[in-house]
Image (cartoon, helix red, strand yellow):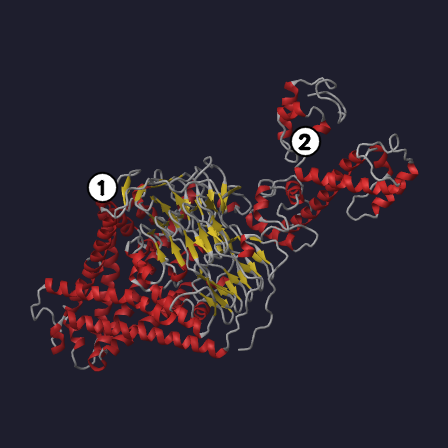
């Protein structure tokens, strides 16, 4: 470099300083290493061969515009002092304009009185004797002073969070200071409470990981003009959450009517059961209940059962369609007050739609016919893979050739504050909606447009024709999700597949197993005798012994049979499938691929083996490839799924939390392709990660909860990824690593053996709990059979009512027994700490009853949570929220929890487990599919928009709006005031 004490800013690099291209190349390289300087190229050097010219060229356009504005104002003030019309910005004050020190002192005095101009001193005048030079000198000084002030204040706040005396402004938050995302979330929350500091988001923290860089980034003025439209998050919600102003009588009447619906459904089920039994065994009407004695051939019973199943199937499909047209008519864009009679009609139709058998047949051509019958406008050749079918069908339009992937949500309604809001969803031709994406109400996508996986469209957002969007909220992207070549459209193929799927559903599977189980049970004379009028069997020990024996056979024998089938049949079907080969949809290979996916995705077995060392052997048995397994005892959570396990590979040392989905299959409207999914070594996957075959991640990556895994760009390694779209964060920090956990391999083997023993006992307790539940269900059913000779089908219906009540209450009791009637407490420990093993037992045995979903949208869901330990207020509307650590959660009154919302009070990253409280205030709204992590405080009246991810440790201030993944506060002047007073109840 040039050996000089000082370099004049107007000296030419080459002629006056004697530098050459090599010297200036070194200068460019050094500049690039300075985080507070813009990058410089050799081209910039030759075009601007002085320091002053180079700095002016590198200055951002907005800075140049600001400097011009200051120049104009200074020239205006000076022209007033000199009493002239115009002052050239490059004219010398003294030589060209004839001013003296007195005149310029008056100029400085007048400038100080202008609030939009920086202060000027006589020293500044003499050092910069032109308007242009003075404006250039004053602007950087003012910005530097402001930046230093922001730096000092940020450092002060962070030192308080870290509990240290001083924080160096150039120290990396994560590598040098040892902070983690939870610590920095607390820092962001404290900064938001400082009126003299700009707001800070976690994304800005990760992008600017030290105080100096953060202060510089925060000093950049927002690019959004005041006249532009508000952000999607602002547009997606009303300016103020409407009050939940239902009267007491409406609240009570709504709950009472919902109870009557449950009872009526049980009455219908009892009647159908009795009619089916009499149809199956016609001699039973004369009192002969022993099917063996009258010699009815099996094939006749089988065809009778098929006819009965077909009639029941048709009835269950017609019932929601009829209810919708009778009670609702056509859905219209409107608002419905929660707990009103109009809301009850809406809830009734929604509940019946969720019971339709077609909701269990994802990807079936029958789904489009069902939606049309419900009033939706659906074009030809549409592929709908999600089993979360829309509710407000009249407001749904789907163009020809559109593909809607698995787990996508487009309900056509949402709950907000005190109302249900209904709005349309419009999809053009050849649209692709990625897996796990959410479309809020009043959204649309143009022809040939795409929405990526784990992405969101907020209310009012429209994807133009042919554009590819991704992220939450959605924005233009470059990734192409149409990766499969379509095959010719064959309507006959869709029709054949629909008919064969219907016949297999009715004639095989559950029908065959149900008939066999029924015949085996009735072959027992003790069971058949329950249907005959005689003295009660309740006092006979055989009555209870039979229930215990059959329940044990179903639970333990069924588990063994399931393991044998899942180990053999899918492997045979897999022989017909080849990876990276395009097959037409609705053919034999499509049927084989669906069968492999359905048989190997067993929630029952996953819950049994997950969160233990034995899950490694289980997933290997069903087809996963795991080279060089590094056993941790927590390689997999209890909830995971895949399209094809034989094409799924997990690298050594990788740990996966609950909710992962291996996306082995890509679709067009007429074809599909199976591809291998490979997760690299030493990865950690957080909750609800959707991992596609095209993922651009390699070894040693941390994929945060709800991250959108990138499918384009370079392969990421040795980094963490967060958000949708994903951005890089530190892979991990050592702040929370306990010294005693860094031990030898011998210690690890000892601790792993102890954990395995505890997990085995937990698995045994889970099987016993299932046995107990099955025994209770059989006892109730046997009691119904015993009383049926006196009360007819009413006894069977009553048994269904009792089973419904027990199905809700018994798991609550089991969970309290598992916790010893103790409330959970925040923890920070290793996965080899005995507390964590106990917490894993809590997860396995907690009340995840399918009956709890029947309480969605009713006043009884809040009571259900209260019995499980959630501190919950009055009039809470829960449309399908999941709460993982119940006794760590507090929810205020009149809150609105939308469908698919999750409140999770823990995190497991690599070998560490952390949990903390979640506190939600009054009148809070959590949007559809929102995810709230641990340690979050949501103050009164705050709103979280659809599919947002609220990061751990975040504080959502009173009345604010948050949206995105990760969620950020929407910076708008129109905040949402809290309704402090609600009409009396």
In the rendered structure, the answer to whether residue 114 lies left or right of residue 164 reads right
Residue at the image point whose x is 64% and y is 42% from the top: 217
In the rendered structure, the answer to whether residue 530 lies left or right of residue 944 reads left
Residue furthest to the front in view is 85
Coordinates of residue 741 in the picture (x, y in percent): 49, 46
Q: Is residue 539 visible?
A: no
Coordinates of residue 727 in the picture (x, y in percent): 52, 42
Q: Name the residue under label 1.
A: 575
Q: Local crowd at mark 1 within 10 Å, few (<14), some, or many (≥20)?
A: few
Along the viewing direction, whichever of 471 and 377 lies nearer the viewer: 377
Query: In the rendered image, which quarter contains the N terminus?
Result: top right
Q: Is residue 381 above or below residue 647?
A: below
Coordinates of residue 657 in the picture (x, y in percent): 42, 50
Q: Can residue 647 be seen in this view?
A: yes
Q: Check disc 1 and report its element: helix, strand or loop.
A: loop
Asked whether disc 2 touches disc 1, contact meaning CB atoms under 8 Å apart, the reply is no
Q: Mark 2 points at which residue?
A: 57
The residues bearing labels 2 and 1 have C-alpha atoms spaced at a distance of 64 Å
Q: Check disc 2 and report its element: helix, strand or loop.
A: helix
Q: Quadrant of residue 630?
A: top left
Q: Earlier in the sequence, mark 2 or mark 1?
A: 2
Coordinates of residue 676 in the picture (x, y in percent): 34, 40
Residue at the image point whose x is 42% and y is 44% from the top: 748
Residue at the image point whose x is 18% and y is 71% from the top: 277
Q: In which quarter of the image is residue 922?
A: bottom right
Q: Local crowd at mark 2 within 10 Å, few (<14), some, or many (≥20)?
A: some
Along the viewing direction, whichever of 661 and 14 lies nearer the viewer: 14
Along the viewing direction, whichever of 484 and 461 lies nearer the viewer: 461
């Amino acid at each position: 470099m040039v050996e000089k004490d000082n370099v004049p800013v107007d000296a030419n690099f080459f002629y006056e300083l004697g530098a050459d291209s090599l010297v200036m190349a070194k200068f460019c390289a050094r500049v690039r290493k300075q985080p507070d300087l813009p990058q410089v190229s050799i081209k910039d050097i030759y075009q601007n061969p002085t320091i002053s010219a180079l700095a002016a060229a590198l200055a951002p356009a907005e800075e140049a515009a600001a400097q011009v504005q200051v120049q104009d104002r200074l020239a205006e003030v000076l022209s007033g002092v000199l009493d002239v019309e115009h002052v050239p910005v490059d004219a010398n004050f003294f030589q060209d304009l004839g001013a003296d020190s007195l005149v310029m002192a008056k100029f400085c005095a007048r400038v100080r009185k202008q609030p939009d101009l920086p202060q000027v001193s006589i020293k500044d005048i003499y050092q910069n004797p032109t308007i242009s030079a003075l404006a250039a000198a004053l602007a950087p000084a003012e910005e530097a002073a402001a930046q230093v002030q922001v730096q000092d204040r940020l450092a002060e706040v962070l030192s308080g969070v870290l509990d240290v005396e001083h924080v160096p402004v150039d120290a990396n938050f994560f590598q040098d200071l040892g902070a983690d995302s939870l610590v920095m979330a607390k820092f962001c929350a404290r900064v938001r409470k400082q009126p003299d500091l700009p707001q800070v988001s976690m994304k800005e923290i990760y992008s600017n990981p030290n105080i100096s860089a953060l202060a510089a980034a925060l000093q950049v003025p927002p690019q959004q003009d005041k006249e532009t439209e508000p952000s999607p998050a602002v547009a997606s919600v009303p300016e103020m959450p409407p009050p939940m102003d239902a009267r007491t009588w409406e609240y009570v009447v709504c709950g009472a009517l919902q109870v009557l619906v449950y009872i009526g459904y049980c009455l219908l089920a009892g009647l159908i059961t009795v009619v089916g039994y009499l149809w199956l065994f016609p001699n039973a009407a004369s009192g002969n209940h022993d099917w063996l004695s009258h010699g009815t051939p099996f094939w006749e019973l089988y065809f009778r059962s098929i006819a009965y199943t077909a009639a029941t199937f048709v009835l269950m499909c017609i019932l929601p369609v009829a209810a919708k047209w009778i009670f609702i008519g056509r859905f219209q864009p409107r608002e419905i007050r929660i707990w009103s009679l109009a809301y009850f009609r809406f809830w009734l139709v929604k509940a019946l739609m969720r019971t339709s058998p077609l909701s269990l047949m994802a990807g079936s051509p029958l789904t489009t016919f069902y939606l049309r019958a419900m009033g939706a406008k659906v074009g030809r050749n549409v592929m709908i893979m999600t089993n979360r079918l829309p509710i407000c069908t009249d407001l749904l339009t789907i163009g020809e050739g559109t593909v809607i992937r698995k787990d996508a949500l487009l309900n056509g309604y949402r709950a907000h504050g005190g109302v249900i809001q209904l709005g349309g969803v419009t999809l053009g031709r050849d649209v692709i909606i990625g897996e796990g994406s959410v479309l809020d109400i009043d959204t649309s996508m143009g022809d040939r447009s795409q929405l990526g996986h784990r992405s969101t469209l907020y209310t009012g957002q429209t994807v133009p024709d042919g554009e590819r969007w991704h992220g939450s909220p959605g924005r233009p992207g470059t990734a192409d999700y149409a990766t499969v070549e379509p095959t010719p459209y064959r309507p006959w193929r869709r029709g054949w597949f629909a008919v064969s799927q219907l016949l297999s559903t009715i004639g095989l599977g559950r029908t065959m197993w149900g008939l066999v189980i029924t015949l085996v049970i009735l072959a027992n004379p003790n069971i058949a005798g329950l249907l005959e009028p005689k003295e009660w069997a309740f006092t006979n020990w055989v009555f209870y012994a039979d229930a215990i024996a059959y329940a044990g056979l179903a639970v333990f024998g069924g588990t063994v049979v399931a393991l044998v089938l899942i180990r053999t049949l899918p492997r045979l079907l897999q022989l017909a499938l080849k990876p990276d080969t395009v097959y037409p949809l609705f053919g034999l290979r499509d049927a084989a691929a669906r069968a492999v996916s359905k048989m190997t995705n067993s929630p029952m077995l996953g819950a049994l083996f997950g969160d233990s060392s034995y899950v490694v052997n289980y997933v290997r048995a069903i087809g996963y490839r795991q080279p060089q397994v590094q056993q941790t005892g927590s390689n997999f959570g209890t909830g995971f799924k895949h399209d094809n396990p034989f094409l799924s590979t997990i690298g050594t040392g990788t740990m996966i939390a609950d909710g992962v989905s291996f996306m082995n299959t890509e679709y067009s409207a007429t074809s599909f392709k199976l591809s291998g999914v490979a997760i690299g070594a030493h990865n950690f996957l957080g909750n609800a990660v959707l991992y596609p075959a095209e993922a651009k991640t390699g070894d040693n990556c941390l994929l945060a909860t709800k991250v959108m895994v990138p499918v384009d760009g370079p392969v990421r390694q040795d980094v963490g990824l967060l958000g949708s779209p994903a951005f890089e964060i530190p892979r991990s920090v050592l702040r929370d690593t306990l010294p005693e956990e860094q031990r030898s391999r011998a210690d690890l083997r000892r601790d792993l053996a102890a954990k395995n023993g505890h997990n085995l006992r937990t698995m045994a307790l889970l099987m016993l709990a299932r046995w107990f539940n099955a025994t209770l269900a059989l006892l109730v059913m046997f009691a119904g059979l015993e009383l049926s000779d006196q009360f007819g089908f009413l006894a069977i219906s009553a048994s269904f009512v009792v089973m419904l009540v027990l199905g809700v209450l018994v798991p609550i009791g089991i969970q309290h027994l598992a916790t010893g009637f103790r409330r959970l407490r925040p923890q920070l420990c290793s996965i080899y700490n005995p507390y964590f093993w106990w917490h894993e037992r809590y997860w396995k045995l907690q009340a995840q009853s399918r009956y709890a979903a029947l309480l969605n949208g009713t006043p009884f869901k809040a009571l259900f949570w209260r019995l499980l330990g959630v501190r919950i207020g009055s009039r809470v509307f829960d449309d399908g929220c999941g709460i993982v650590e119940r006794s760590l959660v507090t929810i205020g009154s009149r809150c609105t929890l939308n469908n698919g919302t999750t409140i999770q009070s823990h995190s497991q990253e690599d070998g560490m487990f952390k949990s903390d409280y979640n506190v939600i205030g009054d009148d809070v709204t959590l949007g559809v599919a929102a995810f709230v992590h641990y340690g979050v405080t949501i103050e009164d009246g705050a709103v979280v928009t659809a599919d947002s991810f609220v990061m751990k440790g975040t504080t959502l201030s009173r009345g604010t709006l948050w949206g995105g993944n990760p969620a950020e506060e929407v910076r708008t002047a129109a905040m949402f005031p809290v309704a402090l007073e609600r009409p009396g109840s």
